[in-house]
């Protein structure tokens, strides 16, 4: 496509030529007519004829030069303005532009266009400078590659990652930099363990596309995940230690106290008459706390050893009806939905739904209500709802905190296991109070 600025300049040149041609043609016609009147007939003497001829020719030449200056100079000024804009110089302005003149109005508008373009370029330069500073300061490696997979941009973090300066890396191919596999990977985002020349660890790599000068380019962003993972790991260990310490103290403190009391009892001489009853009660408390501690350790083991799901086609209709038939304490209604097939681990998914229905039944028992199961399709996902007629949730903040429970004798891992199973299948699980009626709603979303 031709340059639009050059087309405008050519148009002004053609306009200039046409105006001059029209002016000269009009002047020439007037001169020819006047000379014909002078030199035909005997109305004028030779002296008058020559004098008038000189005056007419002089007037015609003066008119031609005046028309040229009147037309050509403004058009040439406009052409110079357009040429400067085409070259990227928006600081030149046309002077003596009169708003009552057509060419003056054009020059005023060109001056306004130049001021607008200058402001826009200034804003673009400032934004580019800001983006460049941000790119240089962020602790994330940024690379851009052209259609030939040659490196066109790298920031300081990228230089540190590859242990070379930008001058040595620019124009190198992605294969030379050992980054080509990430440009052709089917996933735009991935997490890899990799040793780079300047660092090693766990890295998050994201790829996106953009266009520059009409050509497709690739943006590659490499983020160090090691520090974040270590911080998350530290927080997880701290939470685990707090939970284990709390539970162990709850069991070991009474065991220690009872054991001390029984040891003191046995040192008494003579033994009290009811020492057998005291020993029996004390040992019963020790056994009870030891059993509670054993249940806690078993629950934690199940939570930590959840296997990866083995995906296979699972029909949702018979699965939900089978789960509903297992709960006999309260009525369980099933609202039939569409026939859907999931890629899931049937055993894990069944255990998830059993836990949700059991929790809903526990809540419905308090109000002598019922439980309702329903499902539907939402785009590429299946949504399963477990509704109960219980009292609802008073505290939703700790529902998925391990070992948190509001039930007497509860382990506090049921909902945690359910969420782990849902997320392992690429889905999600949430609990909320129902709107428009009392009770709770568990929403399970799974990909089809």
Image: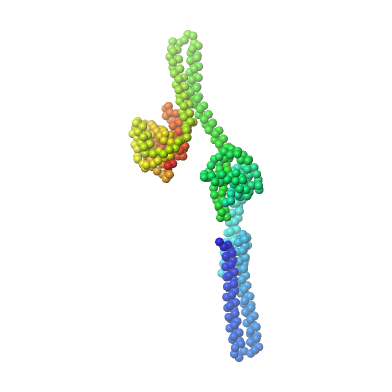
Q: Is residue 195 above or below residue 255?
A: below
**Residue 135 in sight from this viewpoint:** no
Point out the residue furthest to the front here: 175
Q: Residue, x 59% and y 72% (percent of image)?
A: 17
Q: Quadrant of residue 30?
A: bottom right
Residue at the location (45% across, 33% down)?
417
Q: Residue 257 placed where, x, y %?
A: 49, 19
Q: Quarter of the image for the N terminus: give it.
A: bottom right
**Residue 341 spot, x, y in % from top left:** 40, 41
Q: Quadrant of residue 123?
A: bottom right
Q: Nearer the viewer, residue 273 or 20?
A: 20
Q: Residue at x 45, y 36 (%)?
A: 310
Check the image and name the residue furthest to the top: 270
Quick check: can you spot residue 353? yes
User: How many labels sit on residues?
Assistant: 0
The residue under the point 65% across, 44% down is 164
Q: Is residue 192 left or right of residue 381?
A: right
Q: Quadrant of the C terminus?
A: top left
Camera-side residue: 11 or 129? 11
* Residue closest to the eye, 8 or 43: 8
What colouring style does the render use?
A: rainbow
Q: Estimate the x, y position of residue 63 in percent, counting from the top left.
A: 62, 77
Q: Nearer the viewer, residue 269 or 296?
A: 296
Q: Position of residue 272 (x, y in %)?
A: 45, 10
Q: Is residue 135 above or below residue 228?
A: below
């Amino acid at each position: 496509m031709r340059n639009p600025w050059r087309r405008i300049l050519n148009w002004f040149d053609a306009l200039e030529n046409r105006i001059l041609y029209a002016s000269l043609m009009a002047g020439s016609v007037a001169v020819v007519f006047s000379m014909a009147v002078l030199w035909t007939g005997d109305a004028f003497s030779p002296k008058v004829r020559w004098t008038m001829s000189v005056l007419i020719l002089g007037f015609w030449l003066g008119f031609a030069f005046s028309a040229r200056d009147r037309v050509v100079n403004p058009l040439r000024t406009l052409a110079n303005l357009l040429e400067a804009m085409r070259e990227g110089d928006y600081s030149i302005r046309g002077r003596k532009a009169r708003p009552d003149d057509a060419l003056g109005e054009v020059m005023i508008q060109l001056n306004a266009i130049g001021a607008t373009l200058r402001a826009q370029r200034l804003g673009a330069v400032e934004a580019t400078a800001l983006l460049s500073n941000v790119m240089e300061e962020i602790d994330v490696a940024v690379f851009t590659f052209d259609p030939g997979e040659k490196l066109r941009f790298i920031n300081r973090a990228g230089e540190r990652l590859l242990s070379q300066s930008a001058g040595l890396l620019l124009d190198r191919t992605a294969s030379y930099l050992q980054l080509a596999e990430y440009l052709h990977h089917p996933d735009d985002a991935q997490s890899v363990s990799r040793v780079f020349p300047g660092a090693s660890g766990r890295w998050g790599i994201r790829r996106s596309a953009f266009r520059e000068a009409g050509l497709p380019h690739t943006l590659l962003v490499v983020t160090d995940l090691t520090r974040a993972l270590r911080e998350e790991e530290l927080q997880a260990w701290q939470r685990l230690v707090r939970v284990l310490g709390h539970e162990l103290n709850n069991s070991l403190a009474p065991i220690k106290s009872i054991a001390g009391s029984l040891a003191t009892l046995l040192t008494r001489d003579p033994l009290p008459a009811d020492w057998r009853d005291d020993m029996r009660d004390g040992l019963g408390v020790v056994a009870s706390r030891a059993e509670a501690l054993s249940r806690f350790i078993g629950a934690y083991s199940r939570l930590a050893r959840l296997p990866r799901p083995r995906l296979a086609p699972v029909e949702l209709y018979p699965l939900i009806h089978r789960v509903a038939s297992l709960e006999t304490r309260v009525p369980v209604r099933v609202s039939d939905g569409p026939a859907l097939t999931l890629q899931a681990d049937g055993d894990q998914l069944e255990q998830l739904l059993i836990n949700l229905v059991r929790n809903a039944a526990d809540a419905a028992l308090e109000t002598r209500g019922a439980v309702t199961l329903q499902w539907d399709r939402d785009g590429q996902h299946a949504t399963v709802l477990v509704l109960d007629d219980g009292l609802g949730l008073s505290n939703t903040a700790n529902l998925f905190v391990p070992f948190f429970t509001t039930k007497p004798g509860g382990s506090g891992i049921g909902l945690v296991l359910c969420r782990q199973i849902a997320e392992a299948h690429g889905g999600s699980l949430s609990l909320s109070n129902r709107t428009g009626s009392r009770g709770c709603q568990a929403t399970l979303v799974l990909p089809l």
